[in-house]
Amino acid sequence: MLFQGLLALVIMVVFVQPIITYVLDPKHLRKFPSPQYAGLSSIWRIIQNLKKRHYLAIDDVHRRLGTHVRIAPNHISISNPQAVQDIYGHGANFMKDAWYDGGAGEYRHMADTRIKAEHQAKRKKLAHLFAQKTIANLEPVVCGCTGVLVNQIDNHIASNKPINMRRYLNYYTIDLFAELLYGYSLECLERGDDIIDAETKNGKVYKVAFIKSLHEATIKNTVLGMEAPLLPLTKKLFSWHPYMKSGADYDNIVHHNTVKRMRATNNTEDIFSKLLQNSKGEDLNLPFGEVFAECNVMMNAGTDTTTAALTNSIYLIYKHPDVLQKLRKELDGATGEEEVPSYDKLANLPYLRACIEEALRVRPASSMGLPRVVPKGGRWIAGQFIDENVTVSVPTYTLLRNADAFDDAASYIPERWMEGDKDRMNRAHFPFSTGPRACIGRNIAYFEQVLVIGTLVRLFDFDFQSEDFQLETLERFNSNPGEMFLTARRRCV
């Protein structure tokens, strides 16, 4: 009887209730066009996500149907640049949608905290972790890890083997962020794989693949969050699914390293130490669950999105020989003979920064619109009124190719960031989001990209496996690049 009751509830929530709501239209959403059956069910979005092409489906419907599109029964996607400030800007006061509950644990971290006051308290407490001064002090770690990456590329050259740069950049970000966070590397780069220790709460240690665990966990969290009211049921219903195990594996990787670092007392320079004390040396007294939650999201964002950004930059620069030549001219004139230049020598190079910024625009590491809930009383958003308690979002990929903001928007043109109308472009350019919820780790992301891209472009020639190679994008939550095999050669500097 219990099963029949649960099945009836699922049918009611998934099929019957949306039809009733669609017909009655209490929030006046039927005026917004929608693709196929998206106005009746979240299944349309879920299918697009499972195909790993959600961002392209959303982009397509905006091009066909306009700036305000209904992509789920209670979700309006808005591709007008004005919507960025209307929804995400300071003072907008739009709460995060229940979608963020899909991956939330007992303790919320800064990224999935939905209550504004709680987020502000967390951000204030943890802001010193990613201040520019803190990051600058970590430069020896970044340079050291970049040196290991250079050695691995040299090893592939010596053995006459192509290197899967997407994988090795991911090994780089795993090692680097583990060392920045915990004070030690996981040595993925040196081994050439991502098989590392995980540990259950009862102390069982086992080996697991970091990248697979994280990627499958994000698919599970993203899909289940799209039907947030059903989470208490769907988490149990799909508990058998391999993606659930992957989610547990990823949590156990973070648990193992967090427990291991908790026991250490000899490292006061890593980010973890700043989870224990603030910049004044005062104890923060965070419970273990909260420390674990923050480490969990940092190992996710600090590895996955940065890998995408680095891979995309290398791909686009080497796909455009004129850009490569111009960038090398700038790098050769600014750096000395050291393998890995100091950050100071690279930080103010305008064309290097333009190449990185343009890669973030053309191939953003995160393409999905971040969902927010319209506050009480409703709001005018980019020229149209939307009722309260409706979910709204701005599709990142679509906005970053907005023809009104960017000339020849689909093309990779770094010069636009040196010669173009930055005020016009910046209204639609938000690869790290914007406002009070903007990515707190963007400083370290730029820091890594400047050092890695500057070093690799200066030292190596890379050839794709074929002239017509196109780098695939697989959108789970983040837009992950596919495999990218390159044949490397040392460049005469």
Image (spheres, helix red, strand yellow):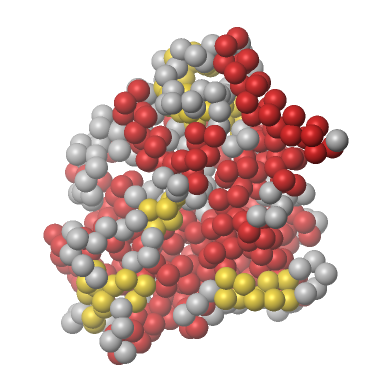
Give residue 370's position: percent from left, percent from top.
52, 37
What residue do we see at 14% from left, 59% from top?
322
**27 up-or-down from 394: above or below:** above
**136 up-or-down from 5: above or below:** below
Indicate the quadrant where residue 212 lies.
bottom right
Is residue 83 in sight in this rendering? Answer: no
8 relative to 82 in the view: left or right: right
Residue furthest to the right: 1
Assign the C terminus to one quadrant of the image.
bottom left
What residue do we see at 57% from left, 71% from top?
209
Give residue 182's position: percent from left, percent from top.
64, 70
492 relative to 97 in the view: left or right: left
What residue do we see at 31% from left, 52% from top?
359
Assign the N terminus to one quadrant of the image.
top right
362 relative to 447 in the view: left or right: left
Question: 267 and 156: which one is in front?
Answer: 156
Residue furthest to the bottom: 158
Is residue 318 in sight in this rendering? Answer: yes
Question: 245 and 473: which one is in front?
Answer: 245
367 relative to 356 in the view: left or right: right
**251 up-or-down from 367: above or below:** below
Question: 169 and 176: which one is in front?
Answer: 169
Give residue 222's position: percent from left, percent from top.
57, 45
**326 up-or-down from 41: above or below:** below
